[in-house]
Amino acid sequence: MNALKVVSSTKVESKRDLAKAKTRHVLLKSALQLYSLEGACGMSMNKIAKGAGIAQPSFYNHFDSLEALQQELGAQLKDNYLSPMRMAWVDMLKDYAMLSKEAFNQRCQHCLTMIFDAAFQNIALFQRLMEDSLRFDLQAENKGLESLITEIREEWTKIFMQGLHSAECSFEAFDVHLCVDIAAAQVHELILGCHQQRYSQQQAIAMLCKNFDGLFSSFFAKEMHRVEG
């Protein structure tokens, strides 16, 4: 009898856990949809709860605050965005000095295509993130999704440094920050240009590959043994 009670209790607890996890997921999805539509100014617990089909007081059963929800959502978005491409960029930088121009272009096109595809999966979200990153004080104590672009740029700096370390290439931190800021600004502007149909994604990526080759080469001047392709 005791064993049956334990099994029964475990099943009930499991169902409760699954239901709570499902509601938590729905809240995150509701927040993402709301942010894509209204940006940081439109975010509220009431709207998110309503979009998830629950009463606002129930929000606190899943998140301590609106900021806590946004931090978790931001972490998920950042991980989903960066994880598939992190090592591709590190490997390209590690091998850069030995790559022919043709080989570099192939790898760079592959890496940039992943970035463009990720942006166009939810272009409304991308636009909101760009707008809010410029509009809000990112030094403020409570940071929401408006800080995500800055956090991603910081991750790109770490990725770049990891690639340079792997290539045993010496560098100054300020040079990496400058390079990443220039590259990020170019990528973001050309994504928006593609969205506005001023040029194609293929044309934008071809131009970025040329620009990135110039940016990267300054770090590898002493190590370059490239075979011109």
Image (tube, grey):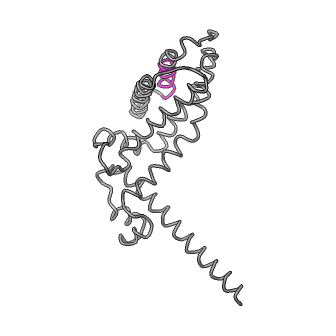
Give the percent coordinates (x, y) of residue 157. 47, 32
Residue at the outermost top position: 228
Residue 154, percent from left and from top: 44, 36
Q: Quadrant of the C terminus?
A: top right
- Residue shown at the point (45%, 26%) measured from the top left: 173
Residue 78 vs 15, above or below: the answer is above
Which corner quadrant of the image does residue 108 belong to?
A: top right
Q: Identify which residue is drawn at 67% across, 82% down.
A: 6
* Vertical side of 78 occupied by 65: above or below: below
Is most of the magenta stretch helix, strand or loop? helix
| Residue 18 position within the rendered picture, expressed as x and y whole percent measured from the top left | 57, 69
- Is residue 97 depicted above or below 93 in this figure? above
Position of residue 95 in the picture relative to residue 69 (left or right): right
Name the residue located 40 percent from the left edge and 68 percent from the top edge. 60
Q: Quadrant of the N terminus?
A: bottom right
Residue 42 falls in which quadrant of the image? bottom left
Point out the stretch of residues depicted in magenta.
201-212
Left or right for 136, reference 62: left
Question: Is 208 within the magenta?
Answer: yes
198 vs 19: above or below? above
Residue 128 part of the magenta-drawn span: no
Residue drawn at x 30%, y 43% as measured from the top left: 139
Front-most of 19 and 96? Answer: 96
